[in-house]
Amino acid sequence: MKKCFKFARENSSSLGFVYRPIAKVGLLDANGEMFELSMLVDSGADISILSKRIGDIMGLDVEQGEAKVFRGIVGELIAYVHEIPLFINGKEVETRVAFALSEVPNLLGRLDIFKNFEINFRKEEEFCFSD
């Protein structure tokens, strides 16, 4: 199956308007009900990352996850890794996700995602997940 998304045109404070690959993914809340979340597809991110606030909605005790230090372009971040089900185009993928205590952008990283899908970026028009 194939699911395509349009690039989102967003305003960057330093670059003006840019086009970003934002995917809609499904997660399960504390009651087992699916909710949708927008995530930036980041081929440079080793792991997907979400804020503690999202973990709270999911009913996770975020700090019970495995504490790890992640390094990126803006420095270091301590986050707690959990394995959760994540849904893309109806396909469930068990995904390791790092939950940060602070607010962070929702990033969909490579770990557990890129091995399950072929992802094609087409200029700044659309990107598609195929399994």
Image (tube, rainbow, N blue to C red):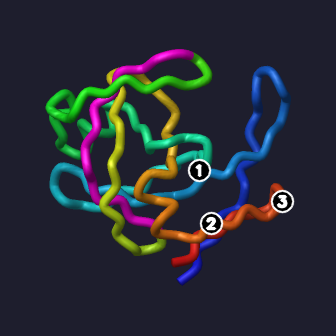
| Overall secondary structure of the magenta section | strand
> Residue under circle 1?
41
Residue type pointed to by label 2: Ile
Residue 88 found in image quarter: bottom left
The residue at 33%/39% (across/down) is 54
Residue 36 found in image quarter: bottom left
Question: Residue most toward the top?
Answer: 75
The residue at 69%/67% (across/down) is 120
Camera-side residue of 7 and 41: 41
> Residue under circle 3?
123
The residue at 80%/61% (across/down) is 125
Residue type pointed to by label 3: Lys
**Local secondary structure at mark 3:** loop
In the rendered image, residue 78 lying in the magenta stretch gets the answer: yes
Label 3, label 1: how many angstroms apart (C-alpha)?
A: 14 Å
Residue 102 vertical position relative to residue 129 in the rendered view, above or below: above
Task: From the top left corner, tell me how far across and down residue 113 is, in percent.
Answer: 46, 59
Camera-side residue of 16 and 110: 110
> Residue under circle 2?
119
Task: Judge from the rendering whether residue 38 lies leftward or rightward of residue 49; answer left or right.
Answer: right
Residue 42 vertical position relative to residue 101 in the rendered view, above or below: below
Q: Give the range drawn in magenta.
A: 75-88
Residue 87 vertical position relative to residue 36 in the rendered view, above or below: below
Circle nearer the N terminus (2, 1): 1
Discs 2, 1 touching: Cβ within 8 Å:
yes
Task: From the top left corner, tell me how far across and down residue 80 is, in percent.
Answer: 28, 31
**Which numbered disc, 2 or 1, marks the residue closer to the eye?**
2
Q: Residues within 10 Å of mark 3 (few under 14, many from 20)?
A: few
